[in-house]
Image (cartoon, grey):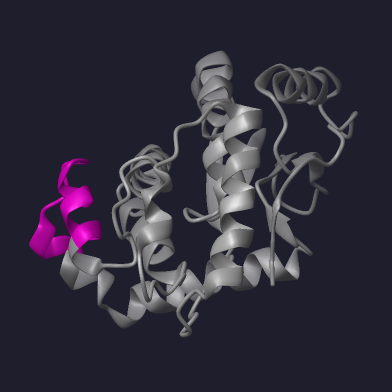
């Protein structure tokens, strides 16, 4: 991509990314197609195999409470009544990879829909059948989605996103960077949650200078473990 654009590194099961979702929508509304957003899946807790214990639930609940307070985004805390839940973020990420093949706008809308299903509707987005049902809401045939979701190509593409984020030194989400592609360096807009007015101002400052400009201070982020 050889034009001004943003790269948004996120995970669908990162609570601070859910808090950041309205900020991304504000960017889309302000700048539209003049500033495309490329979504990269960061891989918060992929391939987790152990169920959450009491300490895990307490830690996650604390994060959710902080995100709700900072962003106003809705949460269904009935999630913490689940037993034996395995917090594996890879299936939801792979679902977005499949949706991204339909275009970046579909990927971003898919991210929002999966986030809302998990955080506000208390649905299990580690379940492929739930993900297939959500894909139909975006106009994707469920059978076609399942076939692509289970394919080796989707697994490899998802791993590729995780590797890209790691190679770029991204250690937490949400992270938003700006650049022109090619060999030109990228500029950090924000690492971690920040309110829309601060992020929009930083994006506009970068566009005004067409290069490195002031970034937003690091905020609250879902850190890689």
- Residue 159 sits above or below residue 161 on the image: below
**The stretch drawn in magenta includes residue 94:** no
Q: Is the magenta stretch mostly helix, strand or loop?
A: helix
Tell me if 145 is positioned left or right of 63 in this view.
left
Q: Is residue 42 visible?
A: yes
- Place residue 137 in its image quadrant: top left
**The stretch drawn in magenta includes residue 134:** yes
- Given residues 73 and 61, the one toward you in this image is 61
- Given residues 196 and 154, the one toward you in this image is 196
Point out residue 70 in the picture as x, y percentages from the top left corner: 66, 30
Pick the quarter of the image with the N terminus. top right
Point out residue 56 in the picture as x, y percentages from the top left corner: 58, 69
Q: Magenta span covers which residues?
A: 130-145
Name the residue located 50 percent from the left edge and 80 percent from the top edge: 48
- Place residue 92 in its image quadrant: bottom left
Name the residue located 81 percent from the left edge and 17 percent from the top edge: 208
Point out residue 59 in the picture as x, y percentages from the top left corner: 63, 60
Tell me if 67 is positioned left or right of 92 in this view.
right
- Given residues 39 and 69, the one toward you in this image is 69
Name the residue located 83 percent from the left edge and 49 percent from the top edge: 185
Point out residue 8 in the picture as x, y percentages from the top left corner: 61, 45
């Amino acid at each position: 991509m050889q034009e001004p654009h943003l790269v948004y590194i996120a995970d669908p099961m990162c609570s601070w990314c859910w808090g950041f979702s309205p900020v991304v929508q504000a960017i889309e509304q302000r700048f539209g197609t003049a500033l495309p957003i490329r979504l990269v899946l960061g891989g918060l807790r992929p391939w987790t195999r152990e169920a959450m214990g009491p300490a895990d639930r307490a830690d996650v609940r604390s994060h959710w409470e902080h995100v709700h307070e900072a962003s106003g985004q809705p949460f269904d805390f009935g999630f913490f009544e689940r037993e034996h839940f395995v917090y594996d973020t890879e299936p939801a990420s792979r679902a977005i990879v499949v949706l991204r093949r339909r275009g970046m706008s579909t990927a971003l809308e898919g991210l929002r829909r999966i986030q809302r299903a998990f955080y506000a509707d208390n649905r299990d987005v580690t379940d492929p059948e739930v993900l297939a049902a959500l894909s139909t809401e975006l106009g994707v045939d469920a059978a076609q989605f399942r076939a692509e979701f289970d394919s080796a190509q989707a697994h490899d593409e998802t791993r590729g996103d995780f590797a890209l984020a790691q190679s770029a030194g991204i250690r937490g989400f949400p992270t938003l960077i700006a650049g022109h592609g090619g060999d030109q360096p990228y500029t950090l807009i924000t690492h971690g949650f920040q309110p829309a007015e601060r992020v929009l101002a930083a994006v506009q400052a970068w566009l005004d200078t067409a290069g490195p400009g002031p970034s937003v201070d690091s905020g609250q982020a879902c850190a890689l473990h």
